[in-house]
Image (spheres, rainbow, N blue to C red):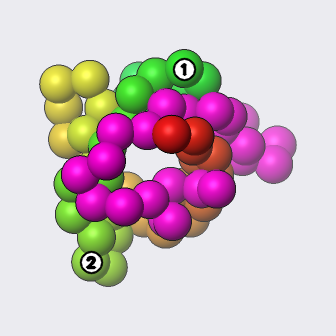
Amino acid sequence: MNLNDAELGVEYKVAEVNTYGDEEMKAFLFSLGCYSGESITVVDKKKNLVVSIKDARYNIDPELGSAIQIEE
């Protein structure tokens, strides 16, 4: 399942970041600390997702959310 399907307030592990060859998107997500094995929590869902990675919060769009595969 991808990050867009996540429940609010539940901590997940990033299983995989699948950007379908978009290296710029992959590098951007990596710079946020979003890579396999890292914990991620969706804090809010409206037009975009507000996610917590490590001790920071980021606002990401649904396209980025669909690239992040998660597991409980």
Q: Position of residue 17 (x, y in %)?
A: 65, 37
> In the image, is 11 to the left or to the right of 29?
left
Query: Depth-wise, is mark 1 or mark 2 nearer the camera?
Result: 1
Q: What percent of the width, then of the height, locates residue 25?
A: 60, 43
Q: Which residue is mark 2?
A: 46
Q: What residue do we see at 23% from left, 52% from top? A: 9
**Residue 35 shown left or right of residue 32 in the figure:** right
Crowding near the residue tagged with mark 1, few <14, some 14–19, many ≥20 C-alpha atoms within 10 Å = few
Question: Looking at this view, is 60 or 41 the one in front?
Answer: 41
| Pick the front one: 18 or 37 | 37
Residue 30 can be seen, yes or no = no
First-in-chain label (1 vs 2): 1
Q: Residue lying farthest bottom? A: 47
Tell me if residue 43 is in the magenta stretch: no
Q: Is residue 62 visible?
A: yes
Going by the numbered disc 1, the residue's amino acid type is: Gly
The N terminus - image quarter: bottom right
Residue at 54 percent across and 33 percent down: it is 14
Q: In this rendering, is residue 14 above or below 18?
A: above
Q: CA distance from mark 1 to mark 2?
A: 26 Å
Q: Can you give x and y, in whole percent of width and height, for residue 12 in the image?
A: 43, 38
Query: Does residue 21 belong to the magenta stretch?
Result: yes
In the image shown, does 34 or 4 lie closer to the viewer? 4
Q: Which residues are drawn in magenta?
A: 1-26
Q: Looking at numbered disc 2 in the image, what kind of residue is underneath it?
A: Lys
> Which residue in the protein does label 1 denote?
37
Q: Write the residue at 20% across / 41% down.
A: 57
Q: Residue at x 22, y 63 (%)?
A: 44
Instruction: State the SS at label 1.
Output: loop
Quarter of the view holding residue 52: top left
Q: Which mark is residue 50?
A: none
Disc 2 on helix, strand or loop? loop
